[in-house]
């Protein structure tokens, strides 16, 4: 009689096998949860890589542009300074060789205004006697620049070579032949203003 008692529903009798296609649902749930909870490995997408590469390119281009701009500024400033030295040297040579007894004081003052350093000190000491000699001789001299060039230059100083032709006349004296002079003028820049600080006559 005990053999005829049916097993409780849901239990397997001894020797029974699970029906085909039946799998434990609890195990399935555990496996799926494990798969969902597992963190995904970080990956760089193509879009992110492209953005990073673009940003690096922009930064590099900005740095290059800034460097080139600075070099251009420095080159332009150096060129302007060389031109300034040359211009002041040319004008200094003209001032020294163009003097008239009729305007001697103004001519000498023009030389002093464009001078500095030891040249200014030396010329200022000789200015008054020089004016007297020019007036007594009723002398006139006129200089013409034949050639001029910048010999050397650094941050605040340049040396200018000038070839000048000078015509001189004195009252009661025959006209003199033009004389050719070569001068080396040192031009110094102080507080943004360039002036002649030294004058040499060269062969």
Image (spheres, grey):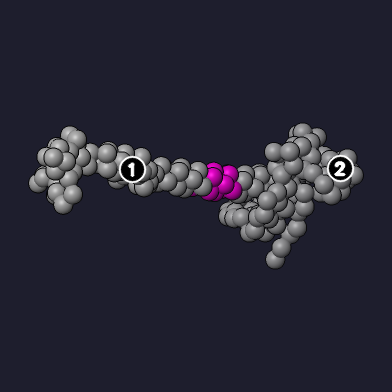
User: Which residue is located at x 22 percent, y 42 percent?
Assistant: 24
Secondary element at tag 1? helix
In the rendered view, would you say 165 is above or below 4?
Answer: below
Residue 133 among those drawn in magenta: no
Residue 147, located in which quarter of the rendered image? Answer: bottom right
Q: Mark 2 points at which residue?
A: 124
Residue occupying image coordinates x 36% and y 40%: 37
Along the line of sight, the residue nearer the viewer: 53 or 80 = 53
Q: Nearer the viewer, mark 2 or mark 1?
A: 1
> x, y percentage for residue 159?
68, 55
**In the orientation shown, which residue stands out farthest toward the front?**
1
Q: Is residue 111 visible?
A: no
The number of numbered discs placed on residues in the rendered structure image is: 2
Extreme residue toward the left, this view: 20
- Quarter of the image where the C terminus is located: bottom right
Q: Name the residue under label 1.
A: 34
- CA–CA distance in space, label 2 to label 1: 100 Å
The spot of residue 9 in percent (x, y) is 17, 34
Main SS category, magenta section: helix
Q: Is residue 152 above or below residue 6?
A: below
Q: In this view, does 195 lie to the left or right of 13?
A: right
Of the numbered discs 2 and 1, the one sitting upstream in the chain is 1
Q: Is residue 110 left or right of residue 22?
A: right
| Residue nearer the viewer, 58 or 1 | 1
Instruction: Assess disc 2: are there few (<14), some (14-19) or many (≥20) residues with their C-alpha within 10 Å of its C-alpha.
Output: some
Q: Over which residues does the magenta segment extend?
A: 68-80
**At 75% across and 58% down in the image, what residue appears?**
200
135 vs 67, left or right, is right
């Amino acid at each position: 009689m005990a053999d005829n008692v049916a097993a409780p529903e849901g239990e397997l009798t001894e020797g029974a096998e699970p029906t085909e296609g039946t799998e434990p649902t609890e195990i399935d749930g555990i496996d799926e949860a494990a798969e969902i909870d597992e963190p995904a490995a970080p990956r760089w997408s193509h879009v992110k890589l492209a953005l990073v590469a673009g940003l690096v390119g922009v930064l590099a281009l900005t740095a290059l542009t800034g460097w080139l701009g600075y070099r251009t500024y420095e080159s332009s400033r150096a060129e302007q300074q060389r031109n300034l030295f040359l211009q002041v040297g040319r004008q200094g040579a003209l001032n020294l060789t163009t003097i008239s007894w009729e305007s001697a004081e103004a001519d000498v003052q023009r030389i002093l205004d464009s001078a500095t350093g030891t040249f200014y000190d030396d010329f200022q000491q000789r200015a008054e006697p020089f004016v007297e000699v020019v007036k007594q001789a009723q002398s006139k001299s006129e200089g013409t620049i034949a050639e001029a060039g910048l010999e050397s230059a650094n941050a605040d100083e340049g040396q200018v070579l000038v070839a000048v032709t000078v015509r001189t006349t004195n009252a009661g004296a025959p006209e003199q032949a033009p004389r050719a002079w070569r001068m080396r003028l040192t031009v110094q820049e102080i507080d943004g203003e360039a002036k002649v600080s030294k004058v040499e006559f060269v062969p």
